[in-house]
Image (cartoon, grey):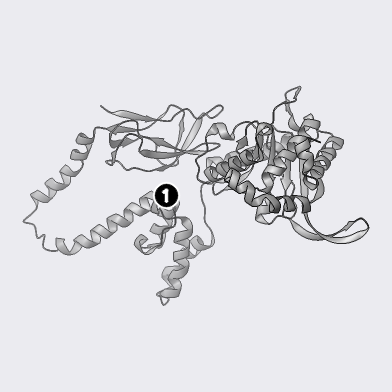
Amino acid sequence: MPTEIKVPALGESVTEATVAKWLKKIGDAVKVDDPLVELETDKVTLEVNATADGSLAEITVAEGGNVAVGGVLGVIGEASGKAAAKPAPAKAAVAEKPVEKRAPAPAAKPAAAVNAASAAVVERSGPAVQRLVAENQIDPAAIAATGRDGRLTKGDVLAELQRKPASAPAPAPVARAPRTPDMREQRVRMTRLRKRIAERLKEAQNTAAMLTTFNEVDMTEVMALRERYRDTFEKKHGVRLGFMSLFVKACIVALKELPAVNGEIDGDDLVYKNYYDIGVAVGTPQGLVVPVLRDADAMSFGEIEKSVGDLGKRARDGKLSLDELSGGTFTITNGGIYGSLMSTPILNPPQSAILGMHKIQKRAVVIDDKIEIRPMMYLALSYDHRIVDGREAVTFLVRVKECIEDPQRILLDM
């Protein structure tokens, strides 16, 4: 009996998804829980799995198409019916024409097998790769695939195109001329996630009275603490002691003292939150996402480090759930891992503030009337001036600075 493939519930406020890629072709056999299609939503990319055994009988929404929650993506038919019906015409055609000069068939067989394997690789690699391969007439079998499950990436194809002129002795400049624009410029459809990121960032700029204040922090004590307890911490918790857990804890100390920084504006109301769900920004190939540490004030340093590592890995693999990306009362972003010395982070609506960490750099500073070389980091707090005053923003950064420069304050909640 045919089984419809439907878009599952995607979480609160998400009503529509875009078909990013079909992982099966019509006629392919499927089993229960086999991934069939990848969907892009405003927040995550997720796979829709088969709910019945059989074969993919119909695709009703092609790649790039939009579909509402509960909409039908395709149909799974019975395995025997579809699998048998598909090859039957091909065999019949061969049987009807055995006498019509089929001598060249054996010679063409190996090429057909190679072409079929190459076509399968390209088919699984997405529309951008398919277009590049077709337009530049590249043999996919000659390209080293670095994508997941042996898929080709755009980078793989572009790297092959750059190597190709070096190995081939300039066959015909006229033939290569039409491909020049493709090499210099590439047009790719914006993903739903990227569009949503753009909308939210612009919304923050248009709505909030956004301002940024800066301070710098001496990382000497924190780095000494990490060095002193590095091995012991890792043996006990199974994870390295990083800077993020210390900054999360320092921010919570400051948030408890300055509740406006942990609040938001809802219409004509100011909402002050007595819980601390801290978002940690993670860069992924699809864009920036902010998974949330729930009730971070109740978590130990080890639990925070484990959670941050796990959320970051699953974010890059596209395995986060919508619930893990929803909510959050305050966000921390670390541009320092990319080498940023200073930046002005943009608010993550509807939150009223975001802390930006940056690169640690040794600088000459004055300590007790002496010039010393210290590892310093610039901190930036962007905040919504409609709910957070300048005094509160500056005080917040000073409290974070004090906790990082003297980590014992965190343990003593001072």
Residue 147 appearing in the image: yes
Q: How far across and down, in percent of the image, does residue 132 sit?
A: 43, 57
Q: How far across and down, in percent of the image, does residue 128 sit?
A: 45, 52
Q: Image height check: is 6 above or below 367?
A: above
Quadrant into which the C terminus falls = top right
Rendered residue at 72%/48% (across/down): 357
| Apparent side of residue 263 relative to residue 232 in the rendered image (left or right) | right
Q: Nearer the viewer, residue 190 or 301?
A: 301
Q: Secondary structure at mark 1?
A: loop
Q: Quadrant of residue 111?
A: bottom left
Rendered residue at 55%/41% (across/down): 193
Rendered residue at 76%/33% (across/down): 255
Q: How far across and down, in percent of the image, does residue 273 sit?
A: 72, 26
Rendered residue at 67%/31% (across/down): 298
Q: Nearer the viewer, residue 191 or 254?
A: 254
**Type of residue at label 1?**
Gly
Q: Nearer the viewer, residue 230 or 34?
A: 230
* Tag count: 1
Q: Residue furthest bottom?
A: 169
Q: Nearer the viewer, residue 189 or 397?
A: 397
Q: Residue furthest right?
A: 369
| Apparent side of residue 7 relative to residue 295 in the rendered image (left or right) | left
Residue 209 appearing in the image: no
| Apparent side of residue 124 relative to residue 189 in the rendered image (left or right) | left
Q: Which residue is mark 1?
A: 126
Q: Quadrant of residue 54?
A: top left
